[in-house]
Amino acid sequence: MEQEMRPLGAQISHMLKARGVDVIFGIPGVHNVEMYRGIEEAGITHVLARHEQGAGFMADGYARATGRPGVAYVITGPGLCNIMTPLGQAYSDSVSVLTLSSCLDETVGHRGQLHQMRDQRAAAAAVCDWSEEARDAQTAYGLIDRAFTEFKCKRARPKHIQVPIGVLGGMASAAPKRKDDSESSYGCSGADHIAREVAYQLENSQKPVFIFGGGLVTLKDDGSVPPNEVYVRDIVRRTGAAAFMTYAGRGLLAADDPLSFGTYLGRPESKRILQESDLVIAIGTELSECDLWRDELGNGGRLVRVDIDPEVLVDRHRADIAVQADGLEFLLAMLQDIPGVTAVAKWDEDEIAATKNRFRAETDAERPGIIEVCDALAEVMPEEAMIFSDMTQFAYVANEVWQMPWSGYWHHPSGFGTLGYALPASIGGAMGRRGKPTVCIAGDYGFQYTVQELGTAVEMKLPIPILLWDNHKLKEIEDCMVESQIAPNAVTALNPDFCKLAQSYGCLAVKPNSFSELQSALTQAFSNDKPTLIHMTASMFKD
């Protein structure tokens, strides 16, 4: 029977639905209007952002919260440029974001067109894994399936596909059905034969240390400990090794694990600890500047690195054994060759506890007054809450001291380090986890980068508590200037009345004056049918 013909934009929407996409974030415009023809018919929810940057961060948050790709629709030219910051963030943090944009049909012989760029595809390529143009329907379908396949089989990176305006409106047959759309149809394998050798070295080492990164994170299923955390916690128990987690790997080990150094890898003294070790095994981490905050890891013994990305394995942290493999599969393979009994600890557990207490005190001394607020919030935070934080001193402290019950439940814009991430990302996360608690943490300056997305959150009736840390300035930059012996300059800006601003969008707003009021405000916010801005300042909590 002859296939039904539809405009290509509509066919793409139906294809995305068939590939499991249920939400698209974006902004329609005259150049991508054909992409919107089939969205409702396909049964996809479209979330209208107030700025393409917001749409990109929403897609990022959705992807992190669900484990499925986040999808964004944008127009030519400025629409694509506006989403490039979120795409750069997704690239740095290994997030599966697919952006589909329109593009002009012809740019060489015709100048002065609306939204014209010299090379739109190349611009997106600067911040994406790849950026390609589909000049016909079959190429568009092939690129979409390529993106979804690579999201499963390779290190997650954002992709961009652009389709000329005329092609989007042209008639096309439906996309081909994929032979197997099940979650098990793709996977990453490798290096089981090396796992036995690493397990042998681990068993015979005197002071081994693991470094567990975000590449080991999988989302928790309701009511059970996810397999990744079973493997991670089991291998520490069965080897007696100590362990660090990167910020992205936070929660892989239990907060009370006596052999865990927590997420203090960025503390200068961690270099001394790694120098004492005769074997360091880093799994699923780039060991980037944002993980270490120094140029070198500092290990004194052998280094084993396991990562899905071969690029990571040949960076400046040259490993004695470099393994390209999925981290979870490699852990499971090692466990096959390690006795199933609890091993004698190879590190002094009392010394680890004392070291963590010292690290916590250092964190408090560097940015005073924040730890107490973190502790108060953590005390009443629902276990299932997923938190999205921005670049703010509050988050810098929380990344080290706030213990998470599960991995993959705190998301921070590491690497690219953009301001304005938390609010739109939490909207995307909340859309992917309807009915489950989602939290936004932002600073007073960065919050204003994407404050307009409050309108989107209200429209979607999302009960997001927005914990706004207001120190009335760019405090981290001011501290950096003082430390560099530079007179502080351009670090203070006029702030609005944040509560009134939030209320003008239809949000609820509260300004607590004590820890108990703060805790009550957070608890109540989850029961509302709209966002609640909770305005926090350090001075509020001082007697």
Image (tube, rainbow, N blue to C red):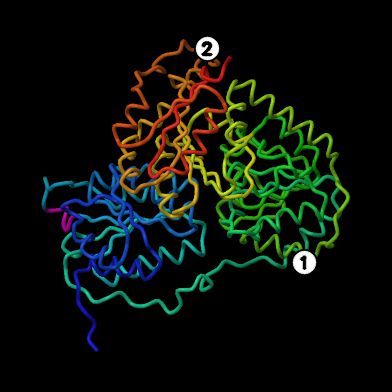
Q: Is residue 358 magenta?
A: no
Locate residue 75 relative to residue 415 in the image: left or right: left
Provide the secondary structure element on which disc 1 rests: loop
Q: Which mark is residue 336?
A: 1
Locate residue 127 relative to residue 50 in the image: left or right: right
Q: Identity of the amino acid at label 2? A: Gln
Q: Nearer the viewer, residue 210 or 40?
A: 40
Q: Nearer the viewer, residue 519 or 192?
A: 519
The picture places residue 2, in percent across and down from the top left corner, at: 22, 86
Q: Which mark is residue 362?
A: none
- 10 Å crowding of disc 2: few (<14), some (14-19), many (20+): few
The picture places residue 538, in percent across and down from the top left corner, at: 52, 20
- 10 Å crowding of disc 1: few (<14), some (14-19), many (20+): few
Label 1 and label 2: CA atoms lie apart by 55 Å
**Residue visible at 76% across and 58% down in the picture:** 198
Q: Nearer the viewer, residue 364 or 130?
A: 364
Locate residue 295 relative to residue 32 in the image: left or right: right
Query: If the image is split into quadrants, where does the C terminus sit?
Result: top right
Name the front one of labels 1 and 2.
1
- Is residue 194 shown above or below 312? below
Q: In the rendered image, which residue does mark 2 sit on?
A: 485
Provide the secondary structure element on which disc 2 rests: loop
Q: Main secondary structure of the magenta part?
A: loop
Quarter of the image where one finds residue 276: top right
Magenta range: 104-109
The picture places residue 264, in percent across and down from the top left corner, at: 67, 36
